[in-house]
Amino acid sequence: MLEKIIELCPDDLWNKKVSGFVFWQQLVHTFSGIYGWLREEKPEIMPPFSIFNGKNIYAEFEHDPEIMLTKTEIKNVCNETKETAEKWLDGKDDEWLKMPFAVFKINNFENIEAQIRHIMYHVGHCEAIFRENGIETGEYLDYFG
């Protein structure tokens, strides 16, 4: 869904501040959460993908970004995030889902569930912005259709 949003977002909306944030900042924020929480290492103090070319893009929405990122740069962030999450999930089983997560008092399943909720919140936010701008998302690929 996030990849489709990157693909569909028109250039005039990409760097525009909408609903309080620069559009692509929503995507970086979402990827930052996935990358930070779905990996073996403990989450970093500073959110992943916060600094680009020495400039802060404020992945946690503290401020407007100091530089604008291109779709290509965000696609690279997406790909790096996918690789990290796939590596973390590779070879895991039901017993692993029940095991404690490396941080906080939750298990691996609860961590995954929290990330899915976070992703879907931001997908919905981006889709709402698209609707307000007359952009249709179409259908997403899933395993049922």
Image: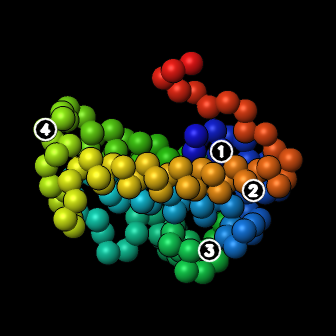
Q: Name the amino acid, label 4.
A: Glu
Question: Pointer 3: residues within 10 angstroms few (<14), some, or many (20+)?
Answer: some
Q: Name the amino acid, label 2.
A: Ile
Q: Nearer the viewer, mark 4 or mark 2?
A: 4
Percent of width and height locating residue 43: 29, 65
Q: Name the amino acid, label 1.
A: Ile
Relative to 11, residue 65 above or below: below
Query: Sequence-wise, which precedes: disc 3 or disc 1?
Result: 1
Q: Nearer the viewer, mark 3 or mark 4?
A: 4
Percent of width and height locating residue 23: 69, 61
Residue appearing at x 16%, y 46% in the figure: 98
Circles 1 and 4, Cβ within 8 Å, touching? The answer is no
Decide which of 65, 140 is in the foreground and name it: 140
Q: Give the Cα separation between the discs numbered 3 and 1.
A: 20 Å
Circle 4 is placed at which residue position?
Answer: 95
Q: Give the Cα separation between the discs numbered 3 and 2.
A: 19 Å
**Looking at the image, can residue 71 be seen?**
no
Circle 3 is placed at which residue position?
Answer: 65
The disc at residue 5 is 1
Circle 2 is placed at which residue position?
Answer: 129
Residue appearing at x 75%, y 56% in the figure: 129
Relative to 29, residue 107 above or below: above
Question: Pointer 4: residues within 10 angstroms few (<14), some, or many (20+)?
Answer: few
Local secondary structure at mark 1: helix
Percent of width and height locating residue 117: 46, 53
Q: Give the Cα separation between the discs numbered 4 and 2.
A: 40 Å
Relative side of 143 to 103, left or right: right
Circles 3 and 1, Cβ within 8 Å, touching? The answer is no
Relative side of 128 to 43, left or right: right
Question: Pointer 1: residues within 10 angstroms few (<14), some, or many (20+)?
Answer: some
Circles 3 and 2, Cβ within 8 Å, touching? The answer is no
